């Protein structure tokens, strides 16, 4: 992580990555609505978000000096935990995808993605304003 970018910016970036990945998982669930014995999946991000916001370091890495920068996770590090979504009971062919539930999750995810995008864009605009000392260019 660059010194320019703080924990909030990194958290917003990771949130956008998570929302994109969750949208892909929900889309896969919707695509398999008629697949026999399919159990839908979902991503859980709460633990990672709490860890990121608290500034907690990974368990195997510790700061040895107060002036050291915090550790930044690798871009390909897992952002979330994949779980089976057991919202609905399986129907006669063993498929437990509930179309209404999946569409609701998709809508919620899209709203949160848009909100994260707005926050991120505002953050970058504020940084641009600070870099140009308010001159606008």
Image (spheres, helix red, strand yellow):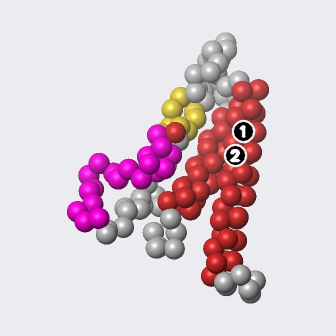
Residue 17 appearing in the image: no
Assess whether residue 65 is covered by the magenta stretch.
yes
Dot 2: element: helix
Local crowd size for mark 1, using a 10 Å CA cut-off: few (<14), some (14–19), many (≥20)? few
Q: Where 67 falls versus 90 (above or below)? A: below
In the image, 114 versus 20, the foreground residue is 114
The location of residue 59, given as percent across then percent down, is: 29, 48
Q: Which residues are magenta?
A: 47-66
Classify residue 50 as left or right of residue 107: left
The reply to whether callout 1 and callout 2 are in contact (CB within 8 Å) is: yes
Residue that extends furthest to the left in the rendered view of this protein = 64
The mark found on residue 108 in the picture is 1
The location of residue 135, given as percent across then percent down, is: 74, 86
Classify residue 106 as left or right of residue 58: right
Residue 39 appearing in the image: yes
The location of residue 100, given as percent across then percent down, is: 76, 26
Name the residue rendered at 59%, 52% in the picture. 15
Dot 1: element: helix
**Residue 120, quarter of picture:** bottom right
Give the Cα distance between marks 1 and 2: 6 Å
Mark 2 lies on residue: 112
Magenta stretch prevailing secondary structure: loop
Name the residue rendered at 31%, 68% in the picture. 68
């Amino acid at each position: 992580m660059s010194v320019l970018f703080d924990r909030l910016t990194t958290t917003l970036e990771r949130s956008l990555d998570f929302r994109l990945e969750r949208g892909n998982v929900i889309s896969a669930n919707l695509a398999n609505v008629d697949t026999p014995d399919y159990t839908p999946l979902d991503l859980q991000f709460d633990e990672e978000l709490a860890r990121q916001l608290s500034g907690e370091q990974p368990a195997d890495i510790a700061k040895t000096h107060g002036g050291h920068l915090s550790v930044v996770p690798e871009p390909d590090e897992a952002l979330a935990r994949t779980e089976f979504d057991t919202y609905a009971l399986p129907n006669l062919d063993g498929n437990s995808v509930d179309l209404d539930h999946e569409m609701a999750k998709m809508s919620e995810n899209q709203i949160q993605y848009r909100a994260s995008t707005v926050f991120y864009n505002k953050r970058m605009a504020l940084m641009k304003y600070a870099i140009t000392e308010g001159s606008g260019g």
